[in-house]
Image (cartoon, coloured by chain):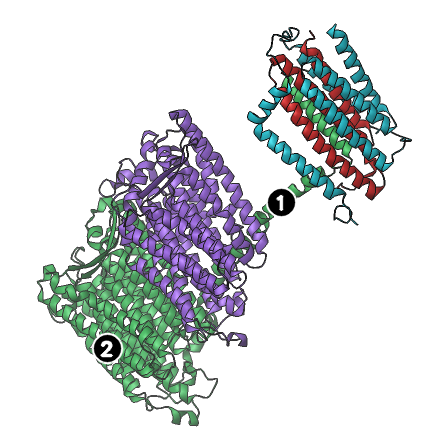
Chain colours: A purple, B cyan, C green, D red
């Protein structure tokens, strides 16, 4: 069974679905085809996850077909611990998103399904590609369906939002393209042969100052997608797919920046952690002042994305594993929150929180789900976000204590703005009479939200399967990240090759006092 | 001996082209241009390019110039009165001279000049129709096909453009 | 030996199961009460079984770890869901499930008619689950899970009647203030993990002191701030009085007996850490004492029956922290247990009074306001008698529970920190005063209700009164489990039971028995003085105190030292402004503005270049020729021969 | 035998005369003729080099240039006719509507 080219199937099946959609007549049929294909992809993924051996760090299910020999580019696909988790959450979220927005998207349904399927393909492509050129192609390819999805199905001012998003993304990708080419060129210079294979590029010894600029280019490209604070203004208008992008950007960080530029990271990591922590507080503060649910969720995503970046740039086992778990739970909780908000708005089509209030008795089921999603994103222990957040804090605390404290304040602010939204929308007296008529969630909607809640609680209560699948590959990544750092001046404290977290325990005082003070 | 022929043709070409751009009456311009073309055909002959010379006269001078003539007649253009020239006349001349200088300098520095190879010594039939024909349909097959398509498009375009009642003509 | 305790995971699981059943499988309100009580009753029985099994073990080995499954394992960070069964956690479990059971029974009567009481009982069960996890966890992270879970349930239960805006606000306030405490708690955890390499109690306490030395004070203070947030000590106490918006059994369970004591339990559990840092101990003691007197002072002038009890809880918690601060952890826990009894009883008594008055008073008269009550002793005898016993207990009158536990704390304070002892004494007087003021205003004196209302007042149903009576008995008898050895050697079974947990502490100095007796008499006299004061003012209506107490002091106390207003002005207001500033100015203007600026510059440059298109063909030709010229010159490299 | 440089100089001269013609004349047809002259100049240098290197490829290029010229003239004159029909004039100075 596993000789079947699983990964290629997962990547290209949605495209087939999209083509199939062209011949389908009628909205409902289109929706069923869209849902069917994504569900099939999920089943395929489940098989893949089952066959995945978590103790090996290197990529599995590898498929390689030479594509452009002259450039040394090949269609090189493989899944390791981290990418299989991120791809898994995408595979899970897509059918749920399609099912969730069944009645919400009514205009041009067929095109919507086509674009959603195309986007899934490009996403899977990004997660599974081991060839830098192919990675870049999927990365760019992802922009087109997103542009249309934001442009057509976004909300008012959506065309402007789509344009703004596109410009930001293009700005980022140009930098990345430049970096990719220089990398390939350097490799060619060093080894004669021209290749874009990531594994090969990891081994490349790049002089530190060049490394600095390359790292900067990659980071800028991904920072736009995260979005990090200065580049985030496109998000509030293009909230529809914000969560997806966080996954992409974080994966970009983990897969490309960390292993390739160890020396540059020695200086850049504290900077990025500081920026991320600032992003957390900044995003949370602004979310506090929003009266529009959509913008509030957008800024909370920015705040949570800051946590993810913080985890990634902690450069140790806990930080990165925390970041990946946080991405997975972010997709579930914020995705669920936004889906629920869309369902509510579909009934009353206003995004303003003030228009609601006292909904607890009119729509109890919805209120319960909204409560679970809000609490998940606040980081209540026992739900998935807490596992990620706590691991990130543990990871960052070892490297930069002050930054961890700032990030931890994000926890308080998160509670404030999320519960403020909940109080305005659900609690309080039922004053407006148009709120009385709202009917509760239909069976389909409940099923979707229930499935998400199941996963949120599941990961919260028993996160080990998720943690174990990526343990080996994070280990390998860290060995990769710190290989040159050892020769570099004692920038990062991780001396031994095993997990970079400081050798804690009895000699902890020596290790701590040496670089914390 | 050949030098005289060359000088003669060159002089005719240059003189008639200068006359052409200064001539007020368009018909005379066309005739002058035909004169230039014929003199250039002569030069082609001196350069053993018989086929091209013939083409030059038949197609270029014969067909294209006649087309010009036809159009001038159609539009019934008379002598141009008044400011025949654009105000930018001096700039144009200066530019022409400026443009000529580097080219001339470059050409003069060309080493191979002066030792024209013996005409008979080269392969027989150089520039003959047979050699051109083989070349056309072997090495340059693709360009020929493209040229054919180009002509087709040109014809269709011209017809469409000038037909009455189409969007282009605005009736 | 651990397998014998393997059933322990059922104790927290049963309330969770009850909550699950209530939420998903049950719509009928009456049945939901039954399910909830059944769940808590079975877990109470299990706790009793654990208690007796633990006593069976020799004193030394009374600490059992029961590991259920490994929760998070990444590299060096390994935390698993495991329960620690030792005397301290067993005592807490007994209190939580015991008092919890009585409150569940009480709630059936109290909430019976409420429409959505199914939701109420599921929340109550969820709370029990979270509290048990907090108490039974064997590592800090599991305690934190319980910590936040309990915070969540108090948020849900305070905001239970969510139609009332005040309830919603109170719920959010409680959660946010708790979150501030949890923020400090998390930082403490991080520090512990960084230095001790693990989060399980056994490993952390086993780390030898000089490893933790540089950060021990930081860790303990951070943990204490977390405790202050949860147990409503002075700077973070603002949420408890507002939490009275929730139904009364909620106040009884959460805001009297269990949740608020979580902080004391945590400090007691980490006694090994706290003992290593003198500054932390003094901080705990000082904050405890100050909170005690501060809250008692405010409680004296409040008119809402539940607010008086809320401030009294804050004050008694201050006592417990004082006890821990001066090293008498056993006394702290003992007071926690006795306080749970009589405070739960007081709240439930108040609840039955409010319950009765709700129907009796006309519209618009607040059933919780003391000024609308009076003379209920004859109308509600059982409630009156049980509340009388509880008030005597809390005032610290001889045979009752409060006397023994408070006396131990006073003894500890006298021995270790005389200044704080004086403060504690003053608080004892105030406590006696405001408790009996409450008693006399509700039950004593002539009724302030007009005749038609008094007919409608009648004693609550048996389901409510039985728990009252049971707790009354416990309040009176409760003290005897910890009789100080002054009266009877070896009778201090409570101290003996907890001794192995606090074995690591330096032996507390024991004053001579005569001094102890003198202290007891002194406290008794002061308590009596307090009672006499309340009697003269509220029964005989004597206004002697009005002339004595300056007007300013009275309003200061009535207005709760304006703490809420100060917080709003200093913290809530500025944060809202900063947030508004950030979103409107920084985000909208600067960043977005920057982008639109870039867009504008591009357009303006475009405008300038636009004029180069003149429309005349020759110009274009000219430009082309110039271009050609430039290229040729560039290529050939020279401009002429 | 005439050196190839003479031919090149001549073709440059013709080319430049054509360019000046294009730049200074107002009548569209004359401009077109100027362009034809420029093309002829180019052809001349093609043939001259063909002769120089003994390769007939130059002739092929001339042949192709002629076809292109033919196409270009066809369209050019069609436009001129249109211009005349719409605006009544052939002077490109008076046709400036396609501007900013």
User: Which quarter of the figure has residue C173?
Assistant: bottom left
Name the chain letter of the residue that bears numbered label 1: C
Q: Is residue C574 left or right of residue C110?
A: right
**Residue under disc 2 on the same chain as residue under disc 1:** yes
- Measure the alpha-carbon separation of dots 2 and 1: 68 Å
Q: Is residue C495 visible?
A: no
Q: Position of residue C508 (x, y in %)?
A: 18, 58
Above or below: residue C472 compared with residue C456: above
> Mark on residue D29?
none
Q: Regarding mark 2 in the picture, which secondary structure is present there? A: helix
Q: Regarding mark 1 in the picture, which secondary structure is present there? A: helix
User: What residue does disc 2 label?
Assistant: C38
Residue drawn at point x = 22 percent, y = 65 percent = C331
Q: Nearer the viewer, residue A17 or A408?
A: A17
Residue drawn at point x = 61 percent, y = 30 percent = B144
Comes first in the chain, label 2 or label 1: 2
> Mark on residue C599?
1
Q: Position of residue C4 (x, y in %)?
A: 11, 64
Q: Position of residue B64 (x, y in %)?
A: 75, 29
Above or below: residue B6 compared with residue C43: above
Count numbered badges in the picture.
2
Q: Nearer the viewer, residue C232 or C533?
A: C232
Residue drawn at point x = 66 percent, y = 23 percent = D62
Q: Nearer the viewer, residue D58 or D7?
A: D58
Q: Say which of marks 2 and 1 sits in front.
A: 1
Q: Is residue C185 left or right of residue C49?
A: right
């Amino acid at each position: 069974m596993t000789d079947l080219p699983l990964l290629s199937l997962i990547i290209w099946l949605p495209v087939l679905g999209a083509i199939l959609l062209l011949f389908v007549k009628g909205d409902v049929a289109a929706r069923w085809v869209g849902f069917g294909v994504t569900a099939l992809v999920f089943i395929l993924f489940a098989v893949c996850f089952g066959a995945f051996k978590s103790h090996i760090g290197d990529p599995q299910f590898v498929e390689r077909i030479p594509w452009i020999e002259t450039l040394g580019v090949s269609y090189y696909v493989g899944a390791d611990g981290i990418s299989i988790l991120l791809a898994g959450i995408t595979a899970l979220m897509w059918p749920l998103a399609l099912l969730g927005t069944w009645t919400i998207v009514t205009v041009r349904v067929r095109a919507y399904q086509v674009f959603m399927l195309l986007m899934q393909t490009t996403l899977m492509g990004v997660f599974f590609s081991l060839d830098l050129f192919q990675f870049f192609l999927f990365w760019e390819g992802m922009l087109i369906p997103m542009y249309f999805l934001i442009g057509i199905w976004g909300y008012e001012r959506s065309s402007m939002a789509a344009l703004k998003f596109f410009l930001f993304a293009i700005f980022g990708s140009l930098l990345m393209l430049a970096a990719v080419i220089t990398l390939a060129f350097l490799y060619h210079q060093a080894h004669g042969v021209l290749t874009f294979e990531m594994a090969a590029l990891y081994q490349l010894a790049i002089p530190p100052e060049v490394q600095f600029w390359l790292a900067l280019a990659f980071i800028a490209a991904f920072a736009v997608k995260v979005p990090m604070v200065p580049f985030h203004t496109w998000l509030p208008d293009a909230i529809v797919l914000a969560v997806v992008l966080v996954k992409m950007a974080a994966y970009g960080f983990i897969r490309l920046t960390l292993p390739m530029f160890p020396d540059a990271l020695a200086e850049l990591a504290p900077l990025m952690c500081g920026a991320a922590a600032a992003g957390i507080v900044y995003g949370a503060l602004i979310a506090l002042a929003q009266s529009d649910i959509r913008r509030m969720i957008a800024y909370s995503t920015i705040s949570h994305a800051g946590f993810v970046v913080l985890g990634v740039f902690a450069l140790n086992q806990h930080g990165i594993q925390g970041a990946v778990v946080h991405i997975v739970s972010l997709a579930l909780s914020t995705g669920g929150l936004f889906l629920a908000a869309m369902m509510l708005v579909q009934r009353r089509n206003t995004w303003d929180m003030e228009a609601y209030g006292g909904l607890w008795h009119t729509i109890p089921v919805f209120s319960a789900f909204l409560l679970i999603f809000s609490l998940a994103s606040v980081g209540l222990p026992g739900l998935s976000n807490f596992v990620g957040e706590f691991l990130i804090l543990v990871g960052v605390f070892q490297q930069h204590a002050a930054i961890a404290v700032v990030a931890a304040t994000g926890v308080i602010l998160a509670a404030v703005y999320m519960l403020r939204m909940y109080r305005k929308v659900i609690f309080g007296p039922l004053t407006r009479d148009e709120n009385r008529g709202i009917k509760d969630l239909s069976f389909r909607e409940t099923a979707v939200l229930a499935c998400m809640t199941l996963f949120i609680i599941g990961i919260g209560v028993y996160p080990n399967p998720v943690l174990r699948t990526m343990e080996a590959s994070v280990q390998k990544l860290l060995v990769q990240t710190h290989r040159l750092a050892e020769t570099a001046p004692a920038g990062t404290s991780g001396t031994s090759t095993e997990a970079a977290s400081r050798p804690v325990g009895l000699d902890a005082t020596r290790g701590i006092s040496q670089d914390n003070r | 001996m050949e030098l005289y022929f060359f000088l003669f043709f060159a002089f005719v070409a240059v003189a008639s082209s200068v006359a052409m751009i200064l001539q007020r009456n368009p018909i005379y311009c066309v005739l002058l241009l035909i004169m230039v073309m014929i003199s250039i055909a002569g030069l082609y002959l001196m350069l053993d390019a018989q086929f091209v010379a013939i083409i030059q006269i038949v197609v270029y001078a014969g067909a294209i110039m006649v087309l010009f003539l036809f159009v001038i007649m159609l539009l019934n253009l008379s002598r141009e009165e008044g400011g025949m020239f654009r105000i930018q006349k001096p700039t144009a001349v200066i530019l022409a001279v400026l443009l000529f200088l580097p080219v001339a300098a470059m050409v003069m520095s060309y080493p191979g000049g002066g030792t024209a190879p013996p005409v008979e010594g080269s392969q027989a039939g150089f520039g003959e129709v047979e050699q051109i024909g083989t070349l056309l349909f072997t090495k340059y097959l693709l360009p020929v096909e493209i040229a054919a398509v180009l002509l087709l498009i040109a014809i269709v375009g011209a017809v469409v453009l000038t037909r009455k009642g189409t969007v282009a003509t605005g009736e | 030996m651990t397998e014998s305790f393997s059933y322990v995971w059922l104790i927290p699981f049963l309330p969770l199961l009850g909550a699950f059943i209530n939420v998903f499988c049950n719509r009928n309100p009456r049945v939901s009460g039954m399910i909830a009580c059944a769940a808590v009753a079975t877990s109470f029985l299990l706790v009793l079984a654990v208690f007796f099994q633990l006593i069976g073990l020799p004193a030394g080995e009374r600490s059992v770890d029961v590991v259920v499954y490994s929760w998070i394992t990444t590299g060096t960070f390994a935390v698993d869901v495991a329960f620690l069964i030792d005397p301290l956690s067993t005592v807490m479990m007994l209190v939580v499930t015991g008092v919890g059971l009585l409150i569940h029974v009480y709630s059936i009567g109290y909430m019976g008619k409420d429409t959505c009481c199914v939701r109420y009982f599921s929340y109550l069960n969820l709370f029990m689950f979270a509290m048990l996890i907090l108490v039974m966890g064997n590592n800090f992270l599991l305690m934190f899970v319980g910590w936040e879970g309990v915070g969540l349930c108090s948020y849900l239960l305070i905001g239970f009647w969510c139609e009332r805006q005040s309830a919603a606000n109170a719920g959010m306030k409680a959660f946010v203030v708790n979150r501030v405490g949890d923020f400090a708690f998390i930082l403490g955890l991080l520090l512990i993990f960084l230095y001790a390499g693990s989060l399980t109690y056994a490993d952390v306490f086993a780390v030898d002191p000089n490893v933790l030395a540089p950060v021990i004070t930081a860790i303990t203070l951070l943990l204490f701030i977390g405790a202050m947030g949860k147990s409503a000590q002075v700077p973070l106490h603002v949420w408890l009085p507002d939490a009275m918006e929730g139904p009364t059994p909620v106040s009884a369970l959460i805001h009297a007996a269990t949740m608020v004591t979580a902080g004391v339990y945590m400090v007691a559990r980490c006694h090994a850490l706290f003992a290593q840092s003198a500054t932390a101990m003094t901080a705990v003691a000082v904050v405890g004492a100050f909170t005690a007197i501060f809250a008692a002072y405010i409680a004296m002038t409040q008119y809402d029956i539940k607010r008086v009890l809320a401030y009294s809880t804050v004050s008694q918690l201050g006592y417990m922290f004082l006890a821990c601060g001066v090293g008498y952890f056993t006394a702290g826990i003992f007071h926690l247990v006795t306080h749970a009894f009589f405070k739960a009883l007081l709240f439930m008594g108040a609840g039955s009074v409010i319950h009765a008055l709700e129907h009796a008073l006309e519209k618009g008269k607040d059933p919780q306001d003391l000024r609308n009550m009076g003379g209920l002793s004859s109308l509600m005898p059982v409630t009156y008698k049980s509340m009388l016993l509880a008030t005597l207990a809390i005032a610290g009158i001889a045979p009752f529970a409060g006397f023994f536990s408070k006396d131990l704390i006073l003894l500890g304070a006298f021995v270790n920190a005389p200044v704080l002892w004086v403060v504690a004494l003053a608080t004892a007087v105030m406590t006696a005063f405001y408790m009996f003021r409450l008693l006399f205003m509700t039950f004593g004196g002539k009724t302030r209700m007009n005749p038609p209302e008094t007919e409608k007042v009648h004693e609550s149903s048996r389901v409510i009164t039985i728990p009252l009576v049971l707790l009354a008995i416990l309040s009176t008898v409760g003290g005897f489990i910890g009789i100080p050895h002054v009266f009877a050697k070896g009778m201090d079974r409570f101290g003996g039971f907890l001794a192995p947990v606090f074995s690591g502490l330096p032996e507390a100095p024991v004053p001579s028995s005569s001094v102890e007796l003198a202290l007891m008499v002194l406290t008794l006299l002061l308590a009596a003085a307090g009672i006499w004061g309340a009697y003269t003012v509220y029964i005989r209506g004597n206004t002697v105190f009005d002339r004595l107490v300056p007007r300013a002091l009275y309003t200061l106390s009535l207005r709760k030292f304006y703490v809420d207003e100060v917080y709003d002005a200093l913290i809530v207001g500025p944060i809202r402004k900063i947030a508004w500033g950030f979103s409107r100015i920084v985000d909208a203007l600067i960043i977005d503005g920057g982008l639109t600026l870039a867009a504008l510059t591009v357009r303006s440059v475009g405008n300038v270049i636009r004029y180069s298109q003149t429309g005349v063909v020759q110009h274009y030709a000219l430009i082309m020729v110039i271009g050609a010229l430039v290229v040729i010159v560039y290529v050939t490299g020279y401009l002429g021969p | 035998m005439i050196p190839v440089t003479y031919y090149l100089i001549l073709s440059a001269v013709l080319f430049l005369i054509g360019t000046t013609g294009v730049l200074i004349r107002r009548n569209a047809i004359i401009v077109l003729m100027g362009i034809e002259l420029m093309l002829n100049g180019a052809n001349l240098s093609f043939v001259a080099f063909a002769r120089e290197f003994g390769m007939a490829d130059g002739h092929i290029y001339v042949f192709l240039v002629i076809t292109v010229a033919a196409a270009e003239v066809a369209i050019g004159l069609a436009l001129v006719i249109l211009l005349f029909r719409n605006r009544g004039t052939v002077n490109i100075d008076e046709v400036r509507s396609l501007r900013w």
